[in-house]
Image (cartoon, rainbow, N blue to C red):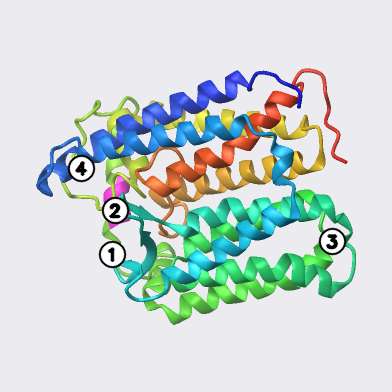
């Protein structure tokens, strides 16, 4: 393995984003933590611990040759473990139920969310498969269905049952991204896309509250408190914001402020400038990530890195889109900014192999050999 330095601009931008995220989690949660009977900085300290763990995981993985993940046995084991954990969550008494949803496992020191793990194992599985067996894309329909589409529908279907449709969509988006970058033909993929869309519509119809959210977005539903408060927060922030800690939504006006609606807190306290700053950091990280992908020494590095970056962009778009009422309300964290243990550690783990790729790629000269 060629020893080199990781892509410094990528890492520096990431650290700035994570540091800013910690600041916003502290600001958004200090009042609710006090109301819960704990100290105002309890959630911040917990989040700081997850960030520290995530950095250690990312640093460790950045020193492992990423080609080792391009292994059929490893990818299949990871996929099998992920499916097992997703099923385990659904078992009463084992899966932790919060707000009528079973999405977590109690692991002693905290709660673990298998759907977050599924995001990286799904991308890893397909990237490895389509590097080792690229003929699957253009081979028999059964082989394509068995090796590519059944795993996608299986993982997304189990996740949707929790229920967590937003997580299922994110997992599916990441895995489909691998197919896209691998060069899947539209005619081959179209029937499965139609089936997936029908499944999403069916789940919306079966759960009236999902359909109600969509109707609210179209202006035909009832009053949506969260979106109203989110827009109010962003609007009152103006250009320069109210100042760190001076936001009012943290006083229990906007639920999940430190999670799904943390972008509203950024807008309220740092204004338009803060919002542009955060979005600019994301844009730079994703651009730099695609640059690493395009200079990757092989096809596996290209597929994995490109798909992770596209998934990252998708999650940012959904979170910001919900907070600004551009898309219907759905629960999705803002990567590296929102509070959340499993999400934070898994995100860092996803970037570990990408940093290793950057160690072996010359971003200035090499155009990428994706063989």
Q: Residue at x 88, y 41 (%)?
A: 371
Query: Visible in this render: residue 324?
Result: no
Q: Position of residue 133 (x, y in %)?
A: 85, 56
Q: Which mark is residue 223?
A: 1
Question: Could you tell me how far apart the alpha carbons at marks 2 and 4 are, in whole angstroms?
Answer: 15 Å
Bounds of the magenta segment: 226-231
Q: Say whether residue 229 is magenta.
A: yes
Disc sitting over residue 137 in the figure: 3
In the rendered view of the protein, which quadrant contains the N terminus? top right
- Tell me the SS state at disc 1: loop
Q: Nearer the viewer, residue 287 or 164?
A: 164
Between residue 131 and residue 320, name the one nearer to us: 131
Number of the label disc, if any, that sits on residue 250: 4
User: Image height check: is 175 above or below 261?
Assistant: below
Q: Earlier in the sequence, mark 4 or mark 3?
A: 3
Res 228 label: 2
Cβ atoms at labels 2 and 1 below 8 Å apart: yes
- x%, y% of residue 334? 43, 44
Mark found first going from the N terminus, 1 or 3: 3
Q: Earlier in the sequence, mark 4 or mark 1?
A: 1
Marks 1 and 3 in Cβ contact (< 8 Å) = no
Mark 4 Cα-neighbour bin, 10 Å: few <14, some 14–19, many ≥20: many
């Amino acid at each position: 393995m060629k020893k080199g330095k990781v892509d410094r601009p990528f890492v520096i931008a990431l650290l700035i984003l994570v540091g800013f995220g910690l600041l916003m989690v502290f600001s958004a949660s200090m009042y609710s933590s006090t109301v819960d009977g704990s100290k105002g900085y309890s959630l911040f300290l917990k989040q700081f611990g997850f960030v520290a763990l995530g950095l250690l995981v990312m640093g460790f993985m950045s020193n492992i040759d990423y080609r080792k993940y391009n292994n059929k046995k490893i990818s299949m084991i990871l996929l099998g473990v992920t499916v097992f954990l997703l099923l385990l969550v659904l078992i009463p008494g084992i899966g932790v139920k919060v707000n009528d949803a079973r999405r977590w496992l109690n692991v002693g020191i905290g709660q673990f969310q298998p759907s977050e793990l599924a995001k990286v194992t799904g991308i890893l599985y397909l990237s490895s498969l389509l590097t080792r067996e690229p003929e699957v894309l253009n081979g028999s329909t059964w082989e394509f269905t068995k090796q590519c589409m059944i795993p996608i529908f299986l993982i997304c279907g189990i996740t949707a049952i929790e229920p967590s449709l937003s997580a299922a969509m994110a997992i599916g988006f990441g895995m489909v991204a691998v197919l896209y970058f691998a060069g899947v033909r539209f005619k081959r993929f179209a029937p499965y896309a139609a089936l997936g869309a029908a499944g999403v519509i069916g789940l919306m119809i079966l759960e009236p509250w999902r359909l109600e959210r969509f109707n609210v977005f179209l202006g035909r539903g009832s009053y949506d408190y969260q979106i109203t408060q989110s827009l109010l927060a962003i609007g009152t922030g103006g250009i320069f914001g109210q100042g760190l800690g001076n936001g009012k939504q943290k006083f229990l006006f906007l639920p999940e402020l430190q999670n799904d609606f943390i972008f509203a807190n950024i807008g309220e306290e740092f204004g338009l400038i803060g919002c542009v700053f955060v979005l600019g950091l994301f844009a730079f990280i994703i651009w730099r990530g695609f640059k690493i992908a395009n200079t990757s020494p092989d096809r596996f590095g290209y597929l994995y890195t490109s798909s992770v970056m596209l998934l990252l962009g998708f999650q940012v778009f959904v979170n910001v889109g919900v907070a600004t009422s551009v898309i219907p309300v759905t629960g999705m964290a803002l990567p590296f900014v929102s509070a959340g243990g499993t999400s934070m550690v898994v995100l860092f783990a996803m970037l570990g192999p990408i940093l290793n790729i950057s160690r072996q790629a010359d971003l200035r000269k090499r155009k990428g050999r994706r063989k």
